[in-house]
Image: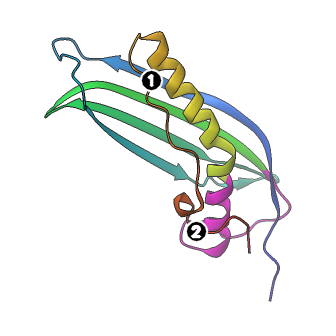
Amino acid sequence: MKEAPEFEIKSISLFESTAIRYEGVSRAPGMEVEVSLENENGDYLDGELECRSICSVTIRNGAEEFALFISHFRPIFTVDREADFTAGTPVGDALNDEVLRQVYPYHRQLVADMMSRMNLPVFTLPLLSDKMLVSGSSGRE
């Protein structure tokens, strides 16, 4: 049985961020917050793998959108050899978990900063937990 390839974070860069406060929608207590987090494993090229991690936070006052925050980071990993990094494979899922571990704190900080700068009540994303990982464990297998 082949050992899984090793990957290590090389860099994380902010690719895009968006903050929108919709006019005409009033602030109210108990607004709903919806969080979406999507990762995409990139292609292996010359020992590196660029991934994508996009976090969207939508705040609603009833059926109306009150605000939208999007953070899009691009982590680059060094990889010791090519493998199938597709989501749903053991290596792809381990990489996805590592993307979350490395990038999620940046999403949390950027979204909180954008809300604060817009003079909105800050909603801090929850801490990363094992149940948020694809493998559901704290370590790679």
Read off the residue under disc 2.
Answer: 136
Q: Position of residue 80 (x, y in %)?
A: 86, 61
The quadrant where residue 64 appears: top left
- Residue at position x 67%, y 65% in the image: 94
The quadrant where residue 65 appears: top left
47 lies above or below 21: below
Read off the residue under disc 1.
Answer: 122
Q: Label 2 vs label 1: CA separation? A: 28 Å
Q: Quadrant of the N terminus?
A: bottom right
The residue most toward the front is 29
The residue most toward the bottom is 1
- Residue at position x 41%, y 37% in the image: 56
In magenta, the rendered stretch is: 78-98
Task: Give the amino acid type for the residue marked by disc 2 in the picture.
Answer: Gly
Q: Position of residue 97 (x, y in %)?
A: 63, 59
The quadrant where residue 15 appears: top right
Return the residue nearer the eye: 40 or 97. 97
Q: Is residue 71 magenta?
A: no
Q: Is residue 94 left or right of residue 39?
A: right
Task: Give the amino acid type for the residue marked by disc 1 in the picture.
Answer: Val
Q: Quadrant of the C terminus?
A: bottom right
Q: Is residue 82 magenta?
A: yes
